[in-house]
Image: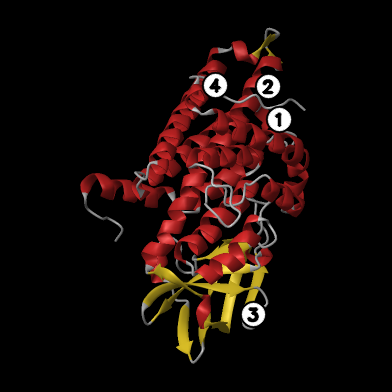
Amino acid sequence: MARFAGVDYLLIDSLFSEEELLVRQTARQFVDERVIPLVRDCYRDGRFPEELIPEMAGLGFLGANLEDYGCAGMNNVQYGLIMQELERGDSGLRSFVSVQGALVMYPILTYGSEQQKQTWLPKLQAGEAIGCFGLTEPGFGSNPGGMTTKATRAGDCWVLNGEKTWITNGSQAHIAVVWARTDEGIRGFLVEKGTAGYSTADIHGKLSMRASVTSSLSFQDCRIPLDNMLPGAKGLKAALSCLTQARYGIGWGVIGAAMDCYETARRYSLTRKQFDGRPIASHQLVQEKLAWMITEITKAQLLALHVGRLKDGGKAEAAHVSMLKRNNVAIALDCARLSRDLLGANGIMDEYPLMRHLCNLETVKTYEGTDHIHALVIGERVTGVAAYK
């Protein structure tokens, strides 16, 4: 198996610090040695590689850009480079790490009580506990404000009723961050696995994200202690702030998938001979496709890096992250399609990663805000006019 040497047409590596390059190399080596050898079989079998969780925790990947409680405290560029390498392996693996850090650990750290932080963050960082994020409902995806899940105060507890769906890590999770409507507005709650009235069911038949656990969550008169409310999570804005963290990681992650597709197609074009016995890399139409891909990947790298620097400086806005996620997922999908085309019939074989990335990226384009939703976020940012309704 050839080691991945990276894709750096414009000498972007010169813009990273030594520490950032070291973090990337650590993640790159992990993916080469531990993820690539098993991910094809995991995808075939529809199985998430749980055996990798302790290793990823040991490398500091879980909640990597968070501070204290055992977290690595990396900057946002280092975190992004981890996401890039993990998604080069598979979107399902990056999705697991993204949910654990951005959608579970981040809201507990940002909106939780000290007791909640002490109880859960060290376990989540160490991979001893797994979390999930319950926002999307069967009838409300792009419009989370329409949620019907309710939490009602009843003496010394909250009673939850409702359903969430398309929840990554759902049935694996020891703790779920659940958003529900109350008399005080939308609030966030922690629901522990095994709580009476709380059940999960995995979603089967997926042709995408097969190396990832996707579930539905059900709450039927589910009673949780009053202390399980996240005290600082008030209103839909709190839930959306968590999505912004996850979308940022996606914007980096999909670059890795695009790189893997591009590099697979580039190498193949140098060895595949056609017509006159020359490699297809010598054909003009093949070079045009490779030129397009490397250009778009380079632009995506620069966009991710700049948003990362803005985020580290406290200047990144949700609308900036929307541009990052929307643009980079779109070009990654196109890179996967062009690469599949360059490999011809071989492109549909799972000996190569192209169809796996292509199918995964169709989901990544949809979750954490669809392409259209992010277009409207950007549109509101440049016009000052909201067009969601």
Instruction: Determine whether label 2 and label 1 are within 8 Å by CB.
Output: yes
Q: What residue type is labelled 4?
A: Leu
Q: Mark 1 points at which residue?
A: 346
Q: How far apart are the alpha carbons under marks 2 and 1?
A: 10 Å
Q: Name the residue under label 4.
A: 290
Per the image, label 2 sits on a secondary structure element best described as: helix
Q: What residue type is labelled 2?
A: Tyr
Per the image, label 4 sits on a secondary structure element best described as: helix
Per the image, label 1 sits on a secondary structure element best described as: helix
Q: Which amino acid does label 3 sit on?
A: Thr
Task: Single out the residue that lies furthest toward the bottom.
Answer: 155
Q: Name the residue nearer the viewer: 62 or 138.
A: 62
Q: Position of residue 162 (x, y in %)?
A: 52, 78
Query: Vertical placement of 351 versus 235: above or below?
Result: above
Q: Earlier in the sequence, mark 4 or mark 3?
A: 3
Q: Mark 2 points at which residue?
A: 268
Q: What residue type is labelled 1?
A: Asn
- Mark 4 Cα within 10 Å, few/some/many (few <14, many 20+)? many
Q: How far apart are the alpha carbons under marks 2 and 3?
A: 52 Å
